[in-house]
Amino acid sequence: MNLIQFPDTVAVAHPPRVAAVTAALRSLVTVVPPFRIPQTVAKERAREVFASRMPFFDQLEQVFDNAAIDARYSCRPVEWFLGPADFEEKTRLYQEHATALAFEAANLALQSAQLRPQDIDVLVFVSSTGISTPSIEARLMNLLPFRSDVMRLPIFGLGCAGGVLGLTRTAQMARSQAGLRCLMIVVELSSLAFRYDRLTKSNLVASALFGDGAAAAVVTSDAGIATPRLATLGVGGEHCWHDTLDVMGWNIDANGFDVIFQQSIPQIIADQYPAALDGFLARHGLSRSDVDRPCCHPGGAKVMDELEIVFGYPKFALDAERRVLAAYGNMSAPTVLFVLEDLLRSGSQGELLMSSLGPGFTAAFQMVSVGAGASDR
């Protein structure tokens, strides 16, 4: 295929965009499936699965030690990973366990916001680790008494950027009409993408990094509920780099999803991410000095090293991100919402900038204002 060459684009500063209707974050919850897998166990099982079939396993085994992960959670017990599974089995498991996690997260988010399923006007569901038609939020409507006229927005394909962009889309929908009450659910079962048959470095790295998790949030555009707002959701946006389709994503075959995961991601953060970040901020009349604290998706230890440099932090200073990575691994889209929950729980105030990177290759951004003195921008 001949690629069309586009000229470099220049970020143009626009006046700040003031939303006529404010999007309020009313609740945020996180959940994980029942099976906790310590990283030491994951390493041992990976040796059982790969060492005799992968000549370079001994040289790459240290990826489990260097990932800065203590444990991860899975929808399946660790023994499930010791043999092959086809796409049909993985799809069945995805539909079953994604629905169960969505049900748990939705209930908790609604309870926290003191709302009933019948109060929700918009259902947003974000996931990229399985295929389901009818989609998971439609299945959820058969388990919880949502109204039959609820608006549904299933979002697939955003990968690790899905937590940020899902929240951005939810806030945009909330602001589109005064009084809307939106429920966003994010579920990723990355463990089901494990490939017993793939003797590749990228598959081994994925085996050392990825886990399962879910999050849910209630976002409203009204002030007519008793629950105080946790935060105000401001402007959001994204930057998609041209000719980077092979950086991150899935190849799909008869045995399911096969991870695309380039080593160059930390270097892209070092070389390309700062301009994308500054471009997003400038488009909304902001600069890095307007950000009190980033809230980053902790994609891995090397990714965190580069993000700390970009934002001017000492190594290990993005402590919430590193805590989440250590406790849960990289859960793809929900991970950054675990970080936001950690920051809110620990009392962070001011202007937070959520950010994550996903297939496309795409950087996602969302401003979150927390506490007294925080703005609605």
Image: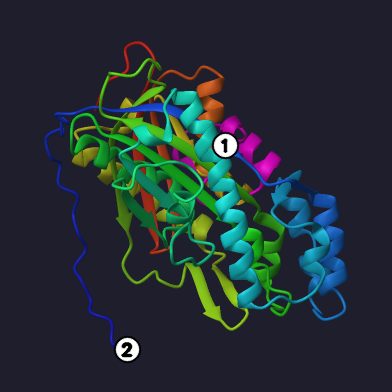
Q: Looking at this view, is 167 or 174 the one in front?
A: 174
Tell whether position 333 is magenta: yes
Tag of residue 1: 2
List x then y, in percent, for residue 73.
71, 48
**Could you say whether the residue bearing mark 2 is in a helix, strand or loop?**
loop
- Vertical relation: 256 (above or below) 209: below
Q: Which residue is mark 1?
A: 30
- Image quadrant occupied by the N terminus: bottom left
Mark 2, Cα crowd under 10 Å, few <14 / some 14-19 / many 20+, is: few
| Residue 339 visible in this rendered orientation of the protein | no
Q: Earlier in the sequence, mark 2 or mark 1?
A: 2
Which span of residues is magenta-colored?
307-334
- Tell me where residue 327 appears, x and y as whole percent: 70, 39
Most extreme residue toward the left, as rendered? 15
* Residue at (21, 63) in percent of width and height: 8
Q: Residue furthest bottom?
A: 1
